[in-house]
Amino acid sequence: MTVIDQIFRKVAEISIPHFFITVEFSASGNDMPEHIEAFLWEKYEAILRGVSGRKFIYKKGEWRLIFTFFPTDRVVDERYALKNKVQMKSKR
């Protein structure tokens, strides 16, 4: 199992109430980054305190991970929605 697989598994095992969390890898390292769970809980508590953002950047060593919190109990905010950006061309 690669380190990236381990990170995916770690994030999947963390149960943050009312949120599904995605992770994007913008820079990777060789060793398993530490304290991911503590980082995610800290950001969850910030959300509960009223922080409007839902994307958080985690940097440790060579790693740069972008975590996005998607609510499971309501429609996703427009700025975080995954949209089909393909435009249909009309036939002439």
Image (cartoon, rainbow, N blue to C red):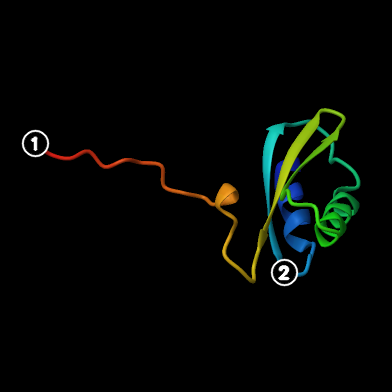
Q: Nearer the viewer, residue 77 or 71?
A: 77
Q: Which residue is pictured at 12% across the width and 39% down the height?
A: 91
Q: Quadrant of residue 19?
A: bottom right
Q: Give above or below for 57 relative to 69.
A: above
Q: Which mark is residue 18?
A: 2
Question: What residue appears at the point 70 percent right and 47 percent down from the top-left corner?
Answer: 5
Tag shown at residue 22: none
- Residue drawn 76% across and 49% down? 6
Instruction: Select label 2 or label 1 by which is in front.
Output: 1
Question: For mark 2, does the 10 Å Cα neighbourhood hold few (<14), some (14 to 19), or many (20 or more) residues?
Answer: few
* Numbered marks: total: 2
Left or right of 38 on screen, residue 20:
left
Q: Looking at the image, which is closer to me, 69 or 50?
A: 50
Q: Position of residue 41 (x, y in %)?
A: 87, 57
Furthest-left residue in view? Answer: 92
Q: Is residue 20 visible?
A: yes
Disc 1 marks a residue whose amino acid type is: Arg
Residue at horizontal 77 percent and vertical 62 percent from the top: 13
- State the quadrant of the C terminus: top left
Residue type of the residue flagged with mark 2: His
Mark 1: which secondary structure? loop
According to the picture, the residue beneath numbered tag 1 turns out to be: 92
Q: Give the CA separation, mark 2 to mark 1.
A: 48 Å
Please tell me which of labels 2 and 1 falls first in the chain.
2
